[in-house]
Amino acid sequence: MIQIAVFSDVHGNLPALNAVLEDMEKRGIHQKFCLGDLVDFAPWGNEVTEKIKALNIPCLMGNHDERIAFDIPVVPLSKHSEEETNARFIAIDHSKKYITEENKKFLSELPFHLKLNYKIGEKHWNIQLVHSGLASNDTYLYESENDEVFADMLRESQSDIVVMGHTHLSFKKPFGNNRWAINCGSVGRSKEENRLASYLILTMGEEQISPEIVQIEYPLEETVRAIGKSDIPDYYAAFLRNEKVSAS
């Protein structure tokens, strides 16, 4: 039996990342993969990036990583309120100023996709890791999406499982025997009601592959206080508490 962990969307939230990594270690899971978005919205973008580097965790380039690495202009999103739009501009500008040149270089060199193949006995398991989609790292694919969208991803990537992040909402969708489309959720900026840090465990045997979404508590108030002491808008602290306040 082989177990691996997949996580995504840390967004500068070091306490959440530490909690997730500690949980993986307690479970004896040593192979870890990150789907990107290390930066923005909490004040530890450098520390998160440096921890991923120090631990040699394979990591993809998320859309936020790409924007910070290459100084891509911020474009308002129609799905965001005016309040969130204003907060987003300020928070991303904070990252552009705060993330070191060395860490921007690291982010710029991250791969777009990663394909894994594990052989157990006579069985090969093919696992496709993406930040959000096969052609884009900024495609929003939710659980409610037409099944054919995910079936096409599995077919195109020739995978048993495709794992994504980006939306900050976890799900598992089965497609026949041992075939899955999975969103591992978000470590540092969950949009789920419970706001817990989320990640995926894949357990592989010769006959079966089993996905488990794990959601754990972390010292959220530590992150809230750090946002309050930074130039990041209070909007993001209130978001983590699942509250509503005006952006500042």
Image (cartoon, rainbow, N blue to C red):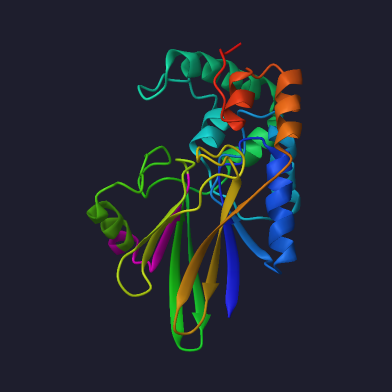
Given residues 202 and 46, the one toward you in this image is 202
Given residues 47 and 192, the one toward you in this image is 192
Position in image of residue 110 (x %, y %):
57, 46
Position in image of residue 164 (x %, y %):
45, 51
Q: Residue at x 70, y 28 (%)?
A: 224
Position in image of residue 133 (x %, y %):
38, 47
The answer to which quarter of the image holds residue 226 is top right
Q: In which quarter of the image is the N terminus?
A: bottom right
- Quick check: 169 left or right of 58? left
- 5 versus 228 height, above or below: below
- 2 versus 112 height, above or below: below
Q: Residue at x 47, y 49 (%)?
A: 170
Q: Which stretch appears magenta? A: 155-165
The answer to which quarter of the image holds residue 157 is bottom left
- Quick check: 161 left or right of 155? right
Q: How many labels does the image show?
A: 0
Q: Residue at x 56, y 30 (%)?
A: 242
Position in image of residue 22 (x %, y %):
74, 56
Decide whether residue 156 is among the magenta residues: yes
Decide whether residue 65 is among the magenta residues: no
Q: Quadrant of the C terminus?
A: top right
